[in-house]
Amino acid sequence: MLHPIPEFLYLQNKTMTMYNKRSSRIMPAVILAGVILSGVSMLILSCRNQPEGSGGSGLSARGSGNGPDGAALYVQYCATCHGTDLRGGNAQSLLDGVWQFGDGYGYVRRNIEFGIPHLGMPSYDDVLSGDEINALVEFLYAEQEKAGAVKPDPSPTLETMDYVISAEIWADDLEIPWAIVFLDEDTALVTERPGTLRMVVKGDLLEDPVKGTPEVLHEGQGGLLDVNIDPDYRKNRWIYLSYSHAIEKGSGDERPPAMTRIVRGRISNMEWVDEQVIYQAPHDTYRTTRHHYGNRIVFDKKGYLYFSIGDRGAQDQAQDPARPNGKIHRIRPDGSIPADNPFMKEGLPTLYTLGNRNPQGLSVHPETDQVWEAEHGPLGGDEINIIRKGVNYGWPVITYGRNYNGTAITEHTAMEGYAQPVMYWKPSTAVCGIEFYQGEAFPAWKNKLLVGALKYEDVRLLTVAEDRVMHEEVILKNFGRVRDVGLDLAGNIYVVVNQPDRVIRLSPIRERVGQ
């Protein structure tokens, strides 16, 4: 059943910049900062080094005597842009419950420390100490709490450049949904990371999950991950799952080692049957870390199956062809290995690329049949790549990101022998699931790339031409952390979000062509 979302906010046209490394320049792009309060511009777009007390702030510069005074720091560095009462000025209000560039203490702290360069916000890491930044963030959250700030409900009606769109809750009562795929016009499967496979029929989430699915290691970022169907599903009924698979602890292991595994099976009377393991890494490559599993599964028109595995927290292993992590793999749907895979002699036979940090999205271009990939960077440097046979994408030898503590990973952003991404974001959006648009519901978006983001809680529509991104538009924002984007057979768009855990359906109300 579809549920309307309370109407509260309206979309506004905004302007941002995006990086296109093919052209080595910053390109303007009109975006729709969807579902944010009117007048919101950016998070903490502060004026640096303002004289203390500038702006005549009415805030009391109270200090405890035990450390930095967050209120005084706000008066000195932030009040000119964000208002003496924190309710906005040249930059957004900090009392409205909306954090446009990531909600949470860590996100806000990083935005202050490292800035948001592409929107003009400078970094403060050379101006404020760590304790001072902590004090400032604590002050901001304390003031929000006093003001009773509540994140507003998003609007059920979205305005994009091409369409007015309806946004409806299509399925909720889920637990960390991770991926979605449609089996037919009315039926979809949704994975839940704790390990359950759910079925939704005509918008109704069936009460019981599919029985007998593989046991997963649900720790950290691990669990039941992607789901996809065979290109010939109507005939063979094969369904593919990826998940974190654990083996018994070895001597000296603190916890069971784990790695991404791919299986296929069928569903009969809500039971998982006929399971076959089509990819399992060598057990000596399993790791006891609990993050960077990847994973997405896609098929090209030739019938090859591509899947991603993240670096599993061992960044240098992304360059090692004897290791499965930090790579894109290519196999056949039955698990057999194409004879022309590029690393057959020097490494693992399933490898198709090297140097991929944590690929969270894969999608195949409907016309070119090229696999496009979305990859998490560290602190900055999220990427969109076109996946090509035998190519090294550079991680961690080159990157546009930094370590989470702000230190350099490498001094290189480009080197001979390593591919540049089609596009990157700095700061990171926490780019996630992607999907090339196909369908009749939104014909103006044919072959455009839908890109979800966890941190920024948005869906972006990228206009691509060959190996370039020509335009970027935000079509949805603030519905939750976007984990995946999918399509039904008619071309309606389904957005899988966490916090809250639900699936949002986007369908057209009317076109805006000529307006």
Image (tube, grey):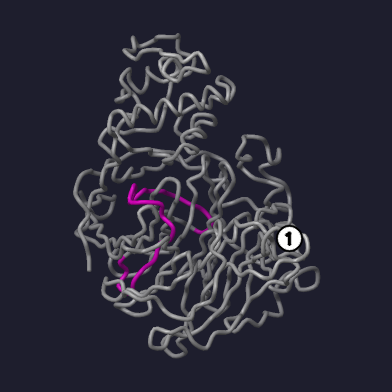
Identify the residue at image location x=34%, y=12%: 57
**Viewer-proximal residue, 439 or 430?**
430
Please say whether residue 478 is one of the residues in the magenta stretch.
yes
Residue 173, percent from left and from top: 32, 63
Identify the residue at image location x=56%, y=19%: 127
Rendered view: 280 above or below 167: below
Q: Quadrant of residue 235?
A: bottom left
Stretch in magenta? 466-492
Magenta stretch: dominant secondary structure: strand
The secondary element bearing badge 1 is classed as: loop
Residue 52, percent from left and from top: 44, 9
Q: Quadrant of residue 178?
A: bottom left
Residue 169, percent from left and from top: 27, 60
Residue 69, percent from left and from top: 47, 17
Identify the residue at image location x=51%, y=25%: 133
**Viewer-proximal residue, 40 or 253?**
253
Instruction: Locate residue 400 relative to residue 250 in the image: left or right.
Output: left
Rendered view: 103 above or below 313: above
Three-letter code for the amino acid on which mark 1 is drawn: Asp
Instruction: Read off the residue under disc 1.
Output: 253
Please say whether residue 505 is one of the residues in the magenta stretch.
no
Classed neighbour count for the residue bearing mark 1: other residues with Cα under 10 Å, few (<14), some (14–19), many (≥20): few
Identify the residue at image location x=41%, y=20%: 78
